[in-house]
Image (cartoon, coloured by chain):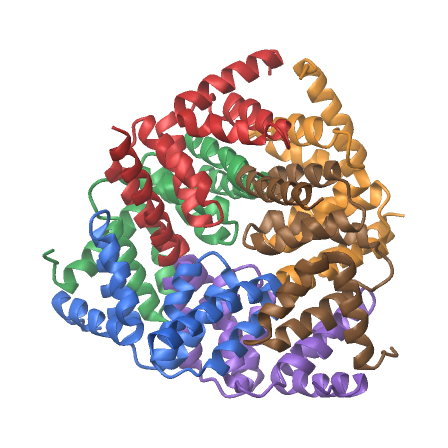
Chain colours: A orange, B brown, C blue, D red, E green, F purple
Amino acid sequence: MTNPIPQDRYSRGLARLTEVDGAAGEAVIAAMADIAPDLGKAIIEFAFGEIYTRPGLSLRDRELATIAALTALGTATPQLKVHLHGGLNVGLTREEIVETILQMAVYAGFPAALNGMFAAKEVFAAREVAV
Amino acid sequence: MTNPIPQDRYSRGLARLTEVDGAAGEAVIAAMADIAPDLGKAIIEFAFGEIYTRPGLSLRDRELATIAALTALGTATPQLKVHLHGGLNVGLTREEIVETILQMAVYAGFPAALNGMFAAKEVFAAREVAV
Amino acid sequence: MTNPIPQDRYSRGLARLTEVDGAAGEAVIAAMADIAPDLGKAIIEFAFGEIYTRPGLSLRDRELATIAALTALGTATPQLKVHLHGGLNVGLTREEIVETILQMAVYAGFPAALNGMFAAKEVFAAREVAV
Amino acid sequence: MTNPIPQDRYSRGLARLTEVDGAAGEAVIAAMADIAPDLGKAIIEFAFGEIYTRPGLSLRDRELATIAALTALGTATPQLKVHLHGGLNVGLTREEIVETILQMAVYAGFPAALNGMFAAKEVFAAREVAV
Amino acid sequence: MTNPIPQDRYSRGLARLTEVDGAAGEAVIAAMADIAPDLGKAIIEFAFGEIYTRPGLSLRDRELATIAALTALGTATPQLKVHLHGGLNVGLTREEIVETILQMAVYAGFPAALNGMFAAKEVFAAREVAV
Amino acid sequence: MTNPIPQDRYSRGLARLTEVDGAAGEAVIAAMADIAPDLGKAIIEFAFGEIYTRPGLSLRDRELATIAALTALGTATPQLKVHLHGGLNVGLTREEIVETILQMAVYAGFPAALNGMFAAKEVFAAREVAV
């Protein structure tokens, strides 16, 4: 019931965002700076500062859930790619990610799984190049 | 590339369905018997016999992914309830389920998270009564 | 490029609505009368008077398309039921309807197909009773 | 860039929630108390304390936007009803609400508009009774 | 209950389309000319001639509702951009648009809000260049 | 209740995939080979080997249903294009396809119909060039 003071939420959220999404996450925040800086701030403070720092579910599990949901929804390819990087950054293996996306064929249909897999293919390739 | 013969897919899938979803899963298959038995058969053979028996992702992780996706989609409350039972049956804790649903507020909005939480509340209560 | 005068759109649409959806369609229009009569009028004039009266696709095919779409979307169960009646009214067989809904498992996932099949089961049963 | 301290977010959000949604909003928070109190807290602090208290868009406009979005999504009927009450509470007229829902036929189809209108019909009737 | 004759619906709708969406709206109609001219005609006659000319909700409010809905749906980026122009054309301020999109984070999740904001950023920049 | 042995499902599915989708379908399977070959295999064995080979609904009707559903969903443009080719390959006329997409304006809104029509326009043009 006790809350940290806001400065803590922001810096804790920014640390978590950087830990999970790396440069890709920071780029999203930066892209919002000239049009809606408070959307970037809410992503840092609420999504990463409040939700992704909660105990009770590991970061790895959180990314698994996010990859599943964004693959199923099929409306957020850029954010799915950020979290495919994020999942790999916090310990998901490529095999686990591929299995998660494949399973979405059961719950959201084969087009959703295919489009998720194309996003994964692109992210995996980008990380090969980056090495 | 080698496949088991179909009888194997069916019995393996049925075993997996029973392991994960228990009576609730079998009730869904039974409800299809007089209108579309092959939909029930496909759920057993494909969803459970082919996907849920794959290595590379634990059953517990598969249920986590499914709960995340169905909460985010918001169009499949009966199936979400089946998999809330399923998740608890294969090792997810209530806390992990609550965290997964809560996190969907970030990716699919607060109404999706609220409706998922109401489903969880109903399932958790049903299991108290059943004890 | 020439249009019928509006009275024609309305009466032509009403005739088509009655032909396709029977009493269920008229009940929807009636239910709008005290809150948004113009929504009912638009359904009659635009949906049924302009679209469902077009040449180039049979009524039977139009209902097939609608049943597929509403099953896949998963957000319009009451309207799906109206069009399950409608499809049977204009010549689709139960087998064709069941096949259409089953196929949606491929494009929108098994929960969408299951929920569509439950709606079909209810509509088929209602027509047995009505005989 | 300066934030109020968290206690302020909570009490400011609770005041705003009560102002907009009245008892219905508080009932949602209460329903979360035994399963996910932090979801209720996030709705109060983030949705109402941070977003609904922002300058730049009137409360009436915020409810208009929410009614439009929830009608179009079609996956959140309980929350749509809460915000139909909310819209009326902060100055939207019934006519404006009916027009907003009707317009969603253009962007999300007639079933979405019909289901939104059925929700409005129920809410309007409940307020007659309550008087 | 009295309707204008169809020619009126068309010219009234075209005038409204031009007033709201300007060249972008007309370009959409033109793009349909060789494949489905009647889709363009229905947009003019029904969407703009019948809905957008109704009393009871201002044009500015209609665009606010449309921007909210299309941001939340996340499946219609080209149409969202047309209506971001439209909203600015009929009196919404950039701040009001940004607030509307930001609020969609609450109802459809942060990815929907982010993608809506990227569309707004592109539209705002295009209008700077055009000046 | 008797099933063909798995090799049969695969070769029967591949033949059906080739018949319906031609080179575009095979390209999708090939694209999965290095990341998730079993997704390609499931599309061949389950979607095409089990569903598209069922009696009770013609191939032409199956493509009509798929085009309707993917247009309405609005989240699977690449797959819609494959099935626009597929529909033409198995006997749908351009007029029937245009009518099906147009009708989706009624059930999923004008943006869905517009985006489906843009996909059809692109596919029709590609087939002109290919002749």
Q: Is residue E10 left or right of residue D104?
A: left
Quadrant location of the C terminus of chain B? top right
Residue located 31% across and 46% down the image? E20
Q: Is residue F112 left or right of residue C30?
A: right
C118 to D34, vertically: above or below:
below
Q: Nearer the viewer, residue C76 or F47?
A: C76
**Which quadrant holds residue A52?**
top right
Outermost residue toward the left in this view: E2
E57 to B22, vertically: above or below:
above
State the image coordinates of residue B128 (x, y, percent, origin top left). 68, 41
State the image coordinates of residue A20 (x, y, percent, origin top left). 78, 36
Residue located 61% across and 84% down the image? F20
State the image coordinates of residue E61 (x, y, percent, origin top left). 32, 37
A110 to D127, vertically: above or below:
below
Counting every numbered tag in the picture gives 0
Q: Nearer the viewer, residue A16 or A99?
A: A99
Residue located 65% across and 36% down the image? B102
Residue located 63% across and 27% down the image? D38
State the image coordinates of residue B85 (x, y, percent, origin top left). 70, 50
**Which quadrant holds residue F32?**
bottom right
